[in-house]
Image (cartoon, grey):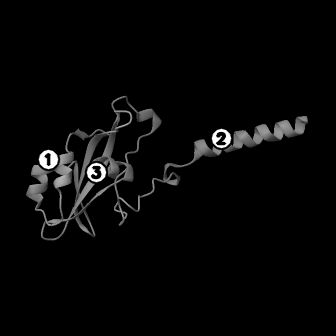
Amino acid sequence: MSMFESTFRLSALVLAAAACIAMPAGARDNPEDAISNPDKLQYSDVNVSYAEMKPEFARDGVLNKLDGVRAIKPGMAQEQVQQALGEPLTQTSSPKGQEWDYNFKLRQPQSGNLLVCQYKVVFDDAKAVRESVWRRRQCQQLAQH
């Protein structure tokens, strides 16, 4: 390999690495899952700069609420959802209705590790469950077992 080819390859690698590092946060994509979230309901992302990052900065969730999640059915009243799942992490409004967001820790069967999963319950104008969705299919699959 000639000196020119070696320098060219090194330059290309440096440029590629710089492009990855310089990629703005908005350019990274966290796609919605068409199976677990067919209407592409939005979830808020957590953003923090490197300088602000602290060890305690982590999405956390409630453990052992799967029986409550499995009980959620269309038509249930908000009070029933709250009894089954507890207080939502956030409550927001969307064109589909009021949305309650929850974070749950689900145990992965192969490793035993915990995965924090985001779950959303959407209510209609009568304050009854319209639908509920997981942010990621992996979480939906863990919840079904």
Disc 2 marks a residue whose amino acid type is Ala
Snapshot quadrant of residue 111? top left
Residue at numbered disc 3: 144
Q: Is residue 47 visible?
A: yes
**N-terminal label among 2 and 3:** 2
Residue 51 place in picture, x, y as percent? 45, 33
In this rendered view, identify the residue nearer to me: 63 or 60: 63
Q: Position of residue 35 (x, y in %)?
A: 38, 61
Task: Kindly tell me whether residue 87 is visible in this rendering.
Answer: no
**Label 1: which residue?**
86
Dividing the picture into quarters, in which one does residue 106 lie? top left
- In what element is the residue under mark 1? loop
Disc 1 versus disc 3: nearer the observer: 3
- Write the residue at 83% across / 37% down: 7
Is 23 rendered above or below residue 126? above
Give the residue at x 34% y 50%: 141
Farthest residue, direction right: 2
Q: Which residue is mark 2?
A: 17
Between the residue at mark 2 and the residue at mark 1, the CA separation in whole angstroms equals 45 Å
- Tell me, yes or no, whether the two marked residues, 1 and 3, touch with CB atoms within 8 Å: no
